[in-house]
Image (cartoon, grey):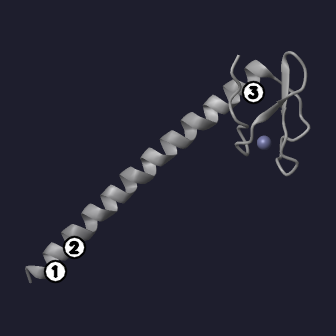
């Protein structure tokens, strides 16, 4: 099973036992917490998906505020 990077810090996980992993980063909030590989990957996937959704939302917001700026500029020029 391929392991995804740490859901909290993005570090590579350390194989703790045949079925368990933990984060190697000592500054990470989940450091030292041994987790089943399957759970680890599910968490990482959820984090990935959430950050993707967040990116899209930010992009949409930027697009909207850009449109707003263009509109303002045009309405300013017409007067
Ligand atoms: Zn970590």
Q: Is residue 66 left or right of residue 4?
A: left
Secondary structure state at the residue bearing disc 2: helix
Compared to residue 32, the image places residue 37 above or below, namely: above
Q: CA distance from mark 1 to mark 2?
A: 6 Å
Which is more toward the observer, 29 or 72?
A: 29
**Residue 3 sits in quarter:** top right
Q: Secondary structure at mark 3?
A: helix
Classify 10 Å Cα crowding around label 3: few (below 14), some (14-19), many (20 and above).
many
Callout 1: helix, strand or loop?
helix
Locate ligand 1 by image quadrant: top right
Residue 73, x across and y down, in percent:
19, 75
Q: Quadrant of residue 16?
A: top right
Looking at marks 2 and 3 on the same chain, the residue that comes earlier in the sequence is marked by 3
- Which residue is drawn at the image coordinates 59% and 36% (left, top)? 48
State the residue position of label 2: 72
Task: State the mark number for residue 40.
Answer: 3
Q: Is residue 63 above or below residue 15?
A: below
The C terminus lies in which quarter of the figure?
A: bottom left
Q: Is mark 1 within 8 Å of ligand 1?
A: no
Q: Point out which mark residue 76 bears.
A: 1
**CB atoms of marks 1 and 2 within 8 Å:** yes
């Amino acid at each position: 099973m391929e392991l995804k990077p740490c859901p909290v810090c993005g570090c590579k996980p350390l194989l703790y036992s045949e079925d368990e992993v933990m984060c190697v980063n000592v500054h990470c909030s989940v450091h030292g917490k041994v987790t089943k590989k399957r759970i680890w990957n599910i968490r990482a996937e959820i984090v990935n998906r959430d950050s993707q959704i967040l990116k899209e939302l930010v992009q949409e917001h930027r697009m909207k505020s850009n449109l707003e700026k263009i509109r303002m500029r045009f309405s300013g020029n017409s007067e």
